[in-house]
Image (cartoon, grey):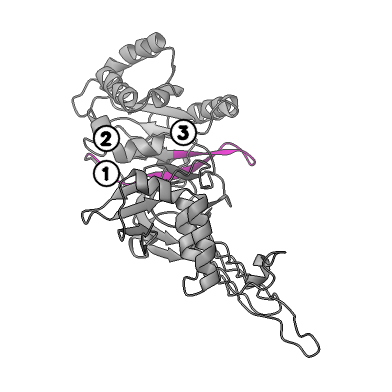
């Protein structure tokens, strides 16, 4: 199966339903008063971590997601139906970012975890809601509030307990094949593994852990050389790093130097990542040349304070001891690793919502204010009472004073939320 770990989508939450403007008309009730109901809320766009989704491949072909709009209010103060949510299933470990700001919207690290990434608009109020002691028979109602829309970037970071690092062809794929049921491609050339492979390693009937065989790391990976960034993002979440070196130096490299170079790349990419506990594993000890390098590798492990294992993945030598140690080490680390990002973040409108006034090339004024733009979208300007209500809100916001301070003149066009107004003293 093709592995896709990035995607970009557009989401649009449902608009709120329009409020109803109506008067109660019944026999023997000559002055029934306003009875228009409120519109229903628009559906939200929700991300959900699902065990049945493994990649972001589907988002290459389906990039637009829209929730249902709310239903309109009706007579007799009947509320409109709420719009159905749009639930987007994503793999466990998906990070969701706002494409415009780069802000992390959600980090889905548990099965079934949900995050609202676009909120549905609230339903417009019916005219019954605007009845007051001074306004006994209002004839206006609100339109529904537009639902949020945004561009989102999706990034999948694998959730593995143990991550394998090391130069290409040191035997990472052979190790994961030997200790789990995963069957990665294995061959005598660099970057045989070009997509991450997860293997579940069983310790006993009740305990197991996930090991990730990820594309090989080389010098310069922190700058994106080779498969650098594609590799490093997947190892960020691992609790324990298995640093694999080729004890036989089949490719002519010094395994001690390889260790130093790989750790330098981890440090350059993330100080937090480089601080993860490591186990130094010398592979290919079944080959005669390995004997010459083992003393230096053992000395390296002592200097670095690392647990050292000499194994042969191909010959299944010393694998049981390695796996049992990994299991005990993971038990120690279980309560120590903190999540890198907040698990779920629901976007809320900030309390600070200033009025911003700009000029366009035609010397017209553009007023930006989230709350005011919503009011414009929800106002029925074909209704005189609705227009008067908006004029009252205009005055309460102090827009005239702000526009005068910017030098507005009689008859100048003012834009608010896609609607044009002509300003008069």
- The residue beneath circle 1 is 192
Distance (Cα) linking label 3 and label 2: 20 Å
Q: Are marks 3 and 1 in contact (CB under 8 Å)?
A: no
| Mark closer to the chain start, 3 or 2 | 2
> Magenta stretch?
190-211
Residue 277 to residue 42: above or below: above
| Mark closer to the chain start, 1 or 2 | 2
Q: Residue furthest front?
A: 425
The dot on residue 238 is 3
Distance (Cα) linking label 1 and label 2: 8 Å
Residue 193 belongs to the span the image colors magenta: yes
Q: Secondary structure at mark 1?
A: loop
Q: Are marks 3 and 2 in contact (CB under 8 Å)?
A: no
Q: Nearer the viewer, residue 410 or 14?
A: 410
Q: Is residue 16 left or right of residue 301?
A: right
User: Residue drawn 60% across and 70% down?
Assistant: 39
| Mark closer to the chain start, 3 or 1 | 1
- The residue beneath circle 2 is 168
Q: Is residue 231 left or right of residue 103?
A: left
Please count the marks in the image.
3
């Amino acid at each position: 199966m093709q592995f896709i770990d990035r995607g970009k989508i557009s989401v649009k939450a449902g608009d709120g339903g329009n409020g109803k403007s109506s008067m109660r008309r019944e026999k023997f009730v000559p002055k029934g008063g306003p009875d228009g109901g409120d519109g229903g809320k628009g559906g939200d766009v929700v991300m959900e971590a699902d065990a049945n989704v493994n990649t972001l491949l589907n988002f290459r072909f389906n990039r637009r997601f829209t929730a249902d709009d709310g239903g309109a209010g009706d007579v007799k103060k009947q509320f409109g139906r709420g719009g159905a949510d749009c639930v987007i299933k994503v793999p466990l470990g998906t990070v969701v970012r706002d494409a415009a700001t780069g802000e992390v919207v959600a980090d889905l690290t548990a099965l079934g975890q949900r995050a609202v990434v676009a909120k549905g608009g609230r339903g417009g109020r019916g005219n019954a809601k605007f009845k007051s002691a001074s306004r006994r028979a209002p004839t206006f109602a609100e339109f529904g509030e537009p639902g949020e829309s945004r561009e989102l970037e999706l990034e999948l970071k694998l959730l593995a307990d143990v991550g394998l690092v090391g130069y290409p062809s040191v035997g990472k794929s052979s190790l994961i094949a030997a200790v789990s049921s995963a069957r990665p491609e294995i061959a005598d050339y660099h970057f045989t593994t070009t997509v991450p492979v997860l293997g579940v390693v069983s310790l006993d009937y009740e305990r197991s852990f996930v090991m990730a065989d990820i594309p090989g790391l080389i010098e310069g990976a922190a700058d994106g050389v080779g498969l650098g960034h594609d590799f490093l993002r997947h190892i960020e979440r691992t609790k324990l790093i298995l640093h694999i070196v080729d004890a036989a130096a089949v490719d002519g490299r010094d395994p001690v130097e390889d260790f130093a170079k790989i750790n330098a790349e981890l440090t350059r990419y993330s100080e937090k990542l480089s601080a993860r506990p490591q186990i130094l594993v010398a592979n290919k000890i079944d080959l005669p040349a390995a004997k010459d390098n083992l003393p230096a590798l053992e000395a390296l492990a002592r200097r670095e304070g690392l647990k050292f294992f000499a194994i042969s993945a191909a010959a299944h030598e010393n694998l049981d001891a390695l796996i049992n140690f990994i299991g005990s080490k993971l038990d120690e680390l279980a309560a120590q690793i903190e999540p890198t990002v907040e698990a779920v973040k629901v976007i809320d409108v900030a309390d600070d919502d200033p009025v911003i006034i700009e000029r366009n090339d035609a010397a017209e004024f553009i007023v930006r204010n989230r709350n005011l733009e919503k009011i414009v979208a929800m106002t029925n300007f074909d209704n005189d009472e609705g227009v008067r209500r908006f004029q009252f809100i205009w005055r309460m916001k102090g827009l005239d004073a702000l526009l005068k301070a910017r030098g507005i003149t009689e008859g100048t066009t003012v834009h608010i939320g896609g609607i044009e107004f002509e300003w008069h003293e």
